[in-house]
Image (cartoon, rainbow, N blue to C red):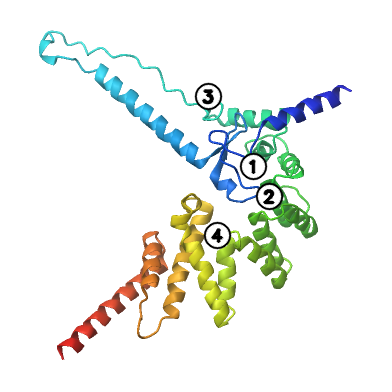
Amino acid sequence: DNRSGRDAIATASASIIDNSKCAMCDAAAQPSSWKNDVAFTTMSCCGLSVCKACMDKASAEKLKEITSKAAEMKSASTPTDPARRNDDDSSPPSKKTQPPIKQTCVACDMPVTNDKREHVKRLLTLAMDKRHPISQYLLAREGLEGNLRGDPTKWLIKAAEAGYPPAMTELADLYRTGDCGVEQSYVSAKIWYEKAGDYAPALFEIACMFRDCVDDEDTSNVYMRKAADQDYPLAMQDLAVYLCSRGDEDLLDESIEIFRRAAEMQVGERAIFQNPKFKDSIISCQYMTASLIMLCAGDDDPVPAEALRWAKAASMNGHEQAKQILSDMEETLALSKMMSKNKISK
């Protein structure tokens, strides 16, 4: 059977693409971890994954090469001894023609393309010929953004059926909302969210579905806590806000601790903080940490150092309410200092 033979070849080819580690340094990806979405980049030309450290290193080396080439061109265009030039010679100095710097994939050395059609074509090759789930998912994303002819959900389904957690989550999202021609079904959404296992974005989304669509807060909190336990910023913020609203002192302490963990990601998880999807949540958690610590402060220490620290961090990140609370803190500190001086003088 020719078709079976082609399938066997395609399956064998797919096994060549190993996304369990960085193609450059062999740094291992965490199985089903949402942090892989931030820590690794999958190349559209070869389908290999490269960790952020190697991507940053390659970018630095490329920048160094560009700077070096620019210096060489500048040096070549400048006469070695301008005083010896013939005053009557108004011709410009000769320039060495430098070949353009080749932009290539750090994993396979294939030329990088900025052309959207070529990018989609490469993804299509990997998705069809090698049945590469990540490329199938990325191809679906291109389709959902209008960059691919035909129904993009077929590629999303293929990637989801291959067990790729981001694809499972996004397919579940479509069932939940009924977008892109998918028939709305909370049952199907739940099935696909749960198939994604412990993948934090799926846990967060199913928690939101139970809370917003099914009105089942208890079940929602079970899933939300599982996502928050993986330090998923959106879930941490959501869970901490819920705990804070319960009016229980023990839950308030837990809420502050969760907000604090999220706030610290600006330093401890820099790549996650720089991701636009998570940055606002982390900054909001910095503000909430400062606010709640202030709420619990006593008269002997009206502006705790930690509250001031997080208010400054959120303020520097552009949070408007944090700027106001920081101003109030500084005013309180100034007033306290002045009162202390008055007591000493008396």
For the residues carrying marks 3 and 2, which lies nearer the camera in this image?
3
Circles 1 and 2 in contact, beta carbons < 8 Å: yes
Which residue in the protein does label 2 denote? 170
Residue at (46, 52) in percent of width and height? 270
Q: Position of residue 311 (x, y in %)?
A: 39, 68
Distance, label 4 to label 2, CA atoms, is: 18 Å
Where 305 falls versus 53 (above or below)?
A: below
Which residue in the protein does label 4 denote? 233
Distance, label 3 to label 1, CA atoms, is: 23 Å
Q: Amino acid at mark 4?
A: Pro
Where 301 falls versus 305 (above or below)?
A: below
Distance, label 3 to label 4, CA atoms, is: 36 Å
Residue at (68, 64) in percent of width and height? 223
For the residues carrying marks 4 and 2, which lies nearer the camera in this image?
4
- The secondary structure type at the circle numbered 1 is helix
Q: Position of residue 206 (x, y in %)?
A: 70, 60
